[in-house]
Amino acid sequence: YNQQCRSKSTASLFNDDDDPNSYNHNNNHQNNNNSNNKSNQSRPIYVAATKQHVGKTTTCLALMSGLKKRFPNSIGYLKPVGQQHVPVYSDTLGKEIRVDKDVTLIREHFKLSHCDYKDMSPVLIPSG
């Protein structure tokens, strides 16, 4: 996951300064070295399940929709391992590559042009 996408994608998720009603009112979770640099902290959310076809992509769509409203320029998406892939053009690589279909859906729907496809779908497992 490249640093440019990471820094832009999760730079201010759940930043306590952004929302006084944030889920964590206790600042003890931050170490003293980072207490003056809250805006650069990221809080990734990992959605997982113990089996397939239980709604992980639907859950991600809902989370992304809510986060995009709250942080319009500060979200990203990564599907570490994908099985169903489609061809897309990677601006970074300058060529067509294959990525997971969910990555294409989320990148295009939420306009995540600051993240390249190759960083959002690093591993593909072919069917079979």
Image (cartoon, grey):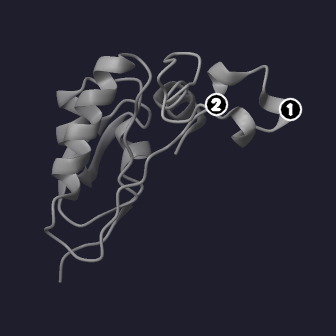
What number is the disc on residue 33? 1
Identify which residue is drawn at 40% across, 17% down. Answer: 73
In space, the residues marked 2 and 1 are separated at their CA atoms by 12 Å
Residue 112 visible in the displayed image: no
- Image quadrant holding the C terminus, namely bottom left
Task: Tell which circle, 2 or 1, labels the residue nearer the N-terminal end.
Answer: 1
* Helix, strand or loop under label 2: loop
Q: Position of residue 72 (x, y in %)?
A: 35, 16
Q: Given the image, on which type of amino acid does mark 2 rest?
A: Gln
Q: Look at label 1 and name its amino acid.
A: Asn
Q: At x 60% / y 35%, what residue is drawn?
A: 3
For the residue carrying disc 1, how many other residues have a C-alpha within 10 Å: few (<14), some (14-19), or many (20+)?
A: few
Q: Which of the 4 quarters of the picture holds residue 89?
A: top left
Q: Which residue is mark 2?
A: 41
In the picture, measured across the screen, residue 54 lies left or right of residue 48, that is left
Whole-percent x, y for residue 19 in the image: 49, 18
Q: Residue furthest right?
A: 33
Whole-percent x, y for residue 91 in the image: 37, 29
Q: Which quadrant of the figure has residue 110?
A: top left
Looking at this view, is 50 or 3 the one in front?
50
| Placement of 127 over or under 103, stated as above or below | below
Q: Is residue 15 left or right of residue 124?
A: right
Residue 20 is labelled as none
Q: Residue at x 28, y 38 (%)?
A: 63
